[in-house]
Image (cartoon, rainbow, N blue to C red):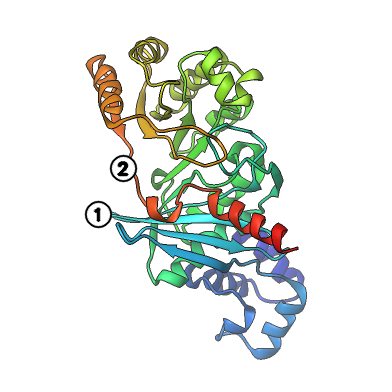
Amino acid sequence: MNLTELTAAVTGMGLPKFRAGQIYRWLHQAGVTAFSEMTDLSLSLRERLDDSFVIFSCGIEKKQVSAYDSTVKYLFSLHDGEWIESVVMKYKYGYTICVSSQVGCRMGCKFCASTLNGVVRNLAPSEILSQVYAAERDLQVRISHVVMMGMGEPLDNYDNVMKFLELISDENGRNISMRHISLSTCGVVPRIYELAEKKLQLTLSVSLHAPNDEIRSSMMPVNRKWQVSELIGACRAYTEKTSRRISFEYALVSGKNDTPACAEELSRLLKGMLCHINLIPVNEVRETGMRKSTPENVKRFASALAAKGFAVTVRRELGSDIDAACGQLRRRAVREQTNGD
């Protein structure tokens, strides 16, 4: 619930309005997981709240910490026994968390472990939010940046994701600036147009990964529904409507999309757009069979784009020793559970 909804619920119980503010602060500023922890409320009131409402929180099923860069990977358990993954990364400016928006994913991208077993269900706004709070409690840190690039396609869970964004950025709650939030999509074109109308100050990251329909369709089934020209049209409309730069994610796969010809075609495709290109050596997942580009090819590809005037970066690989790419830890847990049964 946002504060308005919580206020209506609290006053509907015959309680004074200010109680809603107290409860809201406990939930979103203190990050408590039980009404019994709200110590400035009477015991009888805490019991009434416990009888009337549920606080959904994540349980830490598994935690891995990188020996190289302190990246932390969580396998969280949910109230119904499902699992999701989150990753916390430390940078000079603070801590960033990568959160999941669905249990699994229906999009079928060939290089991604999250989608190998399909989608189970959408996450509620509270379940997305609880990943942030659970990580903060465990690590005893304050997270300043949120990246929606974990398991699932955020724009396939549009309404719940919008509610999560409202809650996480609420000045009465955690108050994380929209400018510190990135939302990634594989290209759900109608939702990009809807998002543009909201004019949010977040960073939209678009998983492009190919400069043409032939290569992209072989890697990303979503391209068979909305082809490259439709996706780029939506992205151009988004930048014009919001004046916000789009970040194009491009996972470099050896021999697939990392050739000089691909770099040239990509530069023509994005010419004149307000954008940034983030090159990613693809995460090698056993089941996908895809191999990352060589460092030489990555450098050559980046240089070709930079020569055309694009802002280009190569993503730093974090947590490589703990399978930090989302989906791998959950898939292993599912496999172990199935074999155990």
- Furthest toward the bottom, the residue is 43
Position of residue 236 measured from the top left corner of the image (x, y, whole percent): 46, 18
Please name the amino acid that badge 1 sits on: Lys
* Figure quadrant of the C terminus: bottom right
> Which residue is outermost to the front?
339
Residue with the mark numbered 2 = 316
Residue at x 41%, y 50% (from the top left corner) = 177
The number of callouts visible is 2
Q: Which of 321 and 48 is in front in this view?
A: 321
Query: Is 145 left or right of 23, judged from the image as shown?
Result: left
Q: From where the camera sits, is residue 128 visible?
A: no
Q: Distance between the residues labelled 2 and 1?
A: 14 Å
Q: Which of 179 and 64 is in front in this view?
A: 64
Q: Quadrant of residue 251?
A: top left
Q: In this view, does 60 lie to the left or right of 205?
A: right
In the rendering, at what x and y percent does residue 89 appear?
37, 55
Residue 195 % position (x, y):
56, 32
Tell me which amino acid carries mark 2: Arg
Quadrant in the picture for residue 94: bottom left
- Residue 59, visible in the rendered structure: yes
> Which of pointers 2 and 1 indicates the residue nearer the eye?
2
Q: Name the residue under label 1.
A: 92
Secondary structure found at label 1? loop
Compare marks 2 and 1 and give the one earlier in the sequence: 1
Q: Can you say whether 157 is above or below 140 in the image?
A: above
Residue closer to the observer: 236 or 75: 75
Residue ID at (48%, 25%): 208
